[in-house]
Amino acid sequence: MPAIRDAFEQALAESGIGLPDRGLARRHALRRMAARLIDGEMTPAELATDDWWETEVETEAEQSFVALIPQCDCCIEYTLGLDQQTWAAQLRNAALALTSSPPIGPGC
């Protein structure tokens, strides 16, 4: 696996493209995840399968989306204090706002 990463990084460097730092990469991934939610490629509960709620965000749209991601999928209704339909609707609205906000840079 390291050989693949090395080749990838070399190809990027030769193209004049640098890898984003971890925080920026997570923000790009957050935007893509919001788009996948809107497109029906993932469910709201699937958002709670990683530590997305810990993502450092910079924009209001990112904050609104991340604030709705629970820490675990087993306690969504307890964590959120909302019924799941209301939460899913709010999450979708936040995802729409995030994906329609200005991109944070190349790659989004």
Image: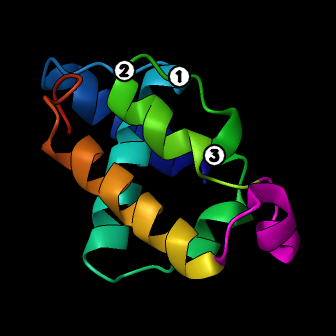
Q: Earlier in the sequence, mark 3 or mark 2?
A: 3
Q: Amino acid at mark 1?
A: Gly
Query: Which is nearer the eye, 74 or 52?
Result: 74
Direction from residue 29 to residue 1 in the image, left or right: right
Q: Badge 2: few (under 14), some or many (20 or more) residues near its Cα, within 10 Å?
A: few
Relative image position of residue 5 (x, y in whole percent): 49, 42
Of discs 1 and 2, which sits in the foreground?
2
Residue position marked by numbered label 3 in the rendering: 52
Q: Badge 1: few (under 14), some or many (20 or more) residues near its Cα, within 10 Å?
A: few
Mark 1–mark 2 CB contact (< 8 Å): no
Quadrant assignment, res 35: bottom left
Q: CA distance from mark 3 to mark 1?
A: 11 Å
Badge 1 marks a residue whose secondary structure is helix
Q: Earlier in the sequence, mark 3 or mark 1?
A: 1
Q: Which segment is the magenta one?
A: 71-83
Relative image position of residue 12 (x, y in whole percent): 25, 30
Relative image position of residue 71 (x, y in whole percent): 79, 53
Q: CA distance from mark 3 to mark 2?
A: 15 Å
Query: Which is nearer the eye, 23 or 99?
Result: 99
Residue position marked by numbered label 2 in the rendering: 59
Q: Badge 3: few (under 14), some or many (20 or more) residues near its Cα, within 10 Å?
A: some
Residue position marked by numbered label 1 in the rendering: 23
Badge 3 marks a residue whose secondary structure is helix
Magenta-drawn stretch, dominant element (helix, strand or loop): helix
Where is 79 relative to 82, above or below?
above
Of discs 3 and 1, which sits in the foreground?
3
Q: Amino acid at mark 3?
A: Trp
Relative image position of residue 85 (x, y in whole percent): 53, 80
Quarter of the image with the C terminus in it: top left
Badge 2 marks a residue whose secondary structure is loop
Q: CA distance from mark 1 to mark 2?
A: 13 Å
